[in-house]
Amino acid sequence: MTQIEHPHYYNAGGVEVIDFIDAHGLNFSRGNIIKYVTRAGLKDGEDELTALLKARFYLDREIQRLQKGSKHE
């Protein structure tokens, strides 16, 4: 179960990304930005560029949401 709940790449730098996201009250898109940036190049089978492109996808979504003036997170 440890591999499912706490893979090595979730705890890079000694802090679980989910704990950081929760502590800062980040919405889904912002949480995914943090998640993909912090684990870029660490997840088995996923190259660094792929993770950063995923982060950019969520960053672009968040920017579009703010540009539209949406209050929804």
Image: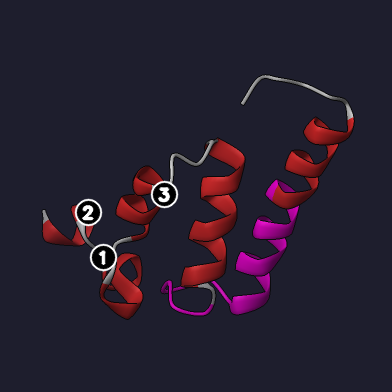
Judging by the rendered image, the residue that carries numbered circle 1 is 7
Is tag 3's residue or tag 1's residue first in the polypeptide sequence?
Answer: 1
The picture places residue 38, in percent across and down from the top left corner, at 49, 70
Does 62 sit above or below residue 57? Answer: above
Checking the image for residue 21, the label placed there is 3
Disc nearest the viewer among 3 and 1: 3
* Picture residue at 49% right of the left edge, 58% below the top: 35
Query: Marks 3/2: CA distance?
Result: 19 Å
Q: Residues within 10 Å of mark 1 (few under 14, many from 20)?
A: some
Q: Nearer the viewer, residue 50 or 23?
A: 23
Is tag 3's residue or tag 2's residue first in the polypeptide sequence?
Answer: 2
Residue 56 highlighted magenta (yes or no) = yes
Judging by the rendered image, the residue that carries numbered circle 2 is 4
Range of magenta residues: 41-58
As shown in the figure, which amino acid type bears the numbered disc 3?
A: Ile
The secondary structure type at the circle numbered 3 is: helix
* Picture residue at 80% right of the left edge, 48% below the top: 60
- Give the image quarter of residue 71: top right
Q: Are marks 1 and 2 in contact (CB under 8 Å)?
A: yes
How many numbered badges does the structure rendering display? 3
The secondary structure type at the circle numbered 2 is: helix
As shown in the figure, which amino acid type bears the numbered disc 2?
A: Ile
Does 73 sit above or below residue 14? Answer: above
Query: Marks 3/1: CA distance?
Result: 17 Å
